[in-house]
Image (cartoon, helix red, strand yellow):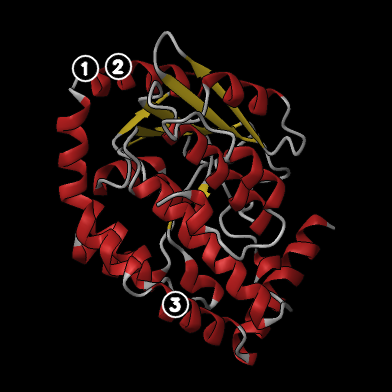
C-alpha cells in the first residue's frame, strides 16, 4: 500500500507527500532524490545510510532521550521505510539506535495521556502503519538491538526477520503493557505468538514480562546475542546470508508466513482504532498513565 493511500487524512504530511510524488515514470523514487532527502533531513530523528554496493540500508533511531514512538517519530519511520521500499536497489534494512543503552522505550505515553479522542485515533493509525510497513516489507529486515526494548520497542523488533541483541544483563525486552494498565491489542499478541508460541506469549502478556537478553534468547524472542560493540557488525554479516537467497523466493515465503496476521489487522483497522480510543480514554486508564508519569518525574528528580 502506497504511503499516500495509507496516510490519507494525516495532518502535517503535505510537503513530504509532494516530495514522494517526485518519482520517475515507473513509479520508483530516484536513488538520487532519496539520497538528497536523507542528507537534507531537518528533524534529525532518523538517520538512514544506504550502501548501494551492499544493497543494505541502516536506519538509526535518534529521537532523544529514549526513542519514544511519538506520532511525529512514527510518521518519520514510515516515510523512511517507504522510501527504501520503493527503491528496488535496496534489498536489506537494519534498524538500530543511536541513543545510549536503549533501542526504543516504546510508545510515547504523552501521546496517550490527556489527549482528545481524535488525537488518540491519529496516533494509533500511525502505530498500525509502522507495524504494517515493517511486518510486510519486501526487504530483509534485521533488528540490531543495542539497548533495552520494552513494549512498542519490542514490537518494532518483532516485525523484523531476525533479531540480534546486545549481551548486556542490564538490558530488557518484552511486551510489558499490562504493567501500565494497558492491554496489548490482538496484532501485538499475534506477532509475538508467531515468534515464541502461544503459551510463552500468554505468560508474557498477562504478567508484563521483561526478559533479560539471555532469557529472551532462551524463549526465542531474539535470535542471537553478541557483545554490545559487535551488534551492528554482526547484523551486517548476518544480512549477507539473507541476501544470498533469491529475493522472490524469500519474499513469497515471508508473505506466506505473515499474510494471515497482516490481513487480520487490515480487515479490522477501524474497529481496532475505535477499541484503542475507547480504552485509552477511560478514566481508570488515564489515572494509571498519570501515576506512571508522576513516578517518572520523581525518578528524574
The residue under the point 17% across, 50% down is 257
The residue under the point 30% across, 58% down is 192
Give the percent coordinates (x, y) of residue 283.
Answer: 65, 91
Contact, mark 1 vs mark 2 (Cβ under 8 Å): yes
Residue hosting label 2: 240
Secondary element at tag 1: loop
Residue hosting label 1: 244
Residue hosting label 3: 270
Q: Which image quarter: residue 269?
A: bottom left
Residue 151 in view of the camera? no
Residue 83 in view of the camera? yes
Give the percent coordinates (x, y) of residue 180.
Answer: 56, 73
Dot 2 alpha-carbon crowd within 10 angstroms: few under 14, some 14 to 19, many 20 or more: some
N-term mark: 2 or 3: 2
Q: CA distance from mark 2 to mark 3?
A: 39 Å
Give the percent coordinates (x, y) of residue 48.
Answer: 58, 27
N-term mark: 1 or 3: 1
Amino acid at each position: 500500500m502506497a504511503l499516500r493511500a495509507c496516510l490519507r487524512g494525516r495532518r502535517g504530511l503535505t510537503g513530504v507527500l509532494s516530495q514522494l510524488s517526485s518519482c520517475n515514470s515507473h513509479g520508483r523514487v530516484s536513488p538520487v532524490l532519496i539520497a538528497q532527502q536523507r542528507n537534507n533531513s531537518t528533524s534529525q530523528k532518523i538517520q538512514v545510510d544506504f550502501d548501494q554496493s551492499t544493497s543494505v540500508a541502516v536506519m538509526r533511531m535518534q529521537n532523544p532521550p529514549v526513542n519514544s514512538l511519538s506520532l511525529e517519530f512514527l510518521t518519520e519511520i514510515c516515510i523512511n521505510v517507504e522510501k527504501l521500499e520503493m527503491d528496488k536497489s535496496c534489498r536489506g534494512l537494519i534498524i538500530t539506535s543511536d541513543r545510549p543503552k536503549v533501542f526504543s522505550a516504546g510508545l510515547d505515553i504523552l501521546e496517550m495521556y490527556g489527549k482528545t479522542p481524535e488525537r488518540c485515533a491519529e496516533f494509533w493509525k500511525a502505530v498500525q502503519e509502522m507495524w504494517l510497513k515493517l511486518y510486510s516489507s519486501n526487504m530483509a529486515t534485521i533488528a540490531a538491538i543495542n539497548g533495552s526494548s520494552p513494549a512498542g520497542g519490542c514490537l518494532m523488533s518483532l516485525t523484523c526477520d531476525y533479531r540480534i541483541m546486545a549481551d548486556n544483563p542490564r538490558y530488557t525486552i518484552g511486551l510489558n503493557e499490562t504493567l501500565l494498565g494497558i492491554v496489548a491489542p490482538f496484532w501485538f499478541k499475534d506477532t509475538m505468538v508467531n515468534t515464541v508460541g502461544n503459551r510463552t506469549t500468554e505468560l508474557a502478556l498477562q504478567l508484563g514480562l521483561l526478559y533479560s537478553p539471555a532469557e529472551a534468547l532462551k524463549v526465542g524472542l531474539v535470535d542471537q546475542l553478541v557483545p554490545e560493540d559487535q551488534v551492528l557488525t554482526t547484523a551486517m554479516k548476518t544480512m549477507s546470508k539473507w541476501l544470498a537467497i533469491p529475493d522472490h523466493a524469500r519474499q513469497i515465503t515471508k508473505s506466506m508466513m505473515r499474510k494471515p496476521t497482516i490481513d487480520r489487522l487490515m480487515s479490522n483497522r477501524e474497529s481496532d482504532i475505535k477499541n484503542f480510543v475507547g480504552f485509552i480514554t477511560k478514566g481508570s486508564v488515564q489515572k494509571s498513565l498519570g501515576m506512571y508519569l508522576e513516578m517518572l518525574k520523581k525518578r528524574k528528580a
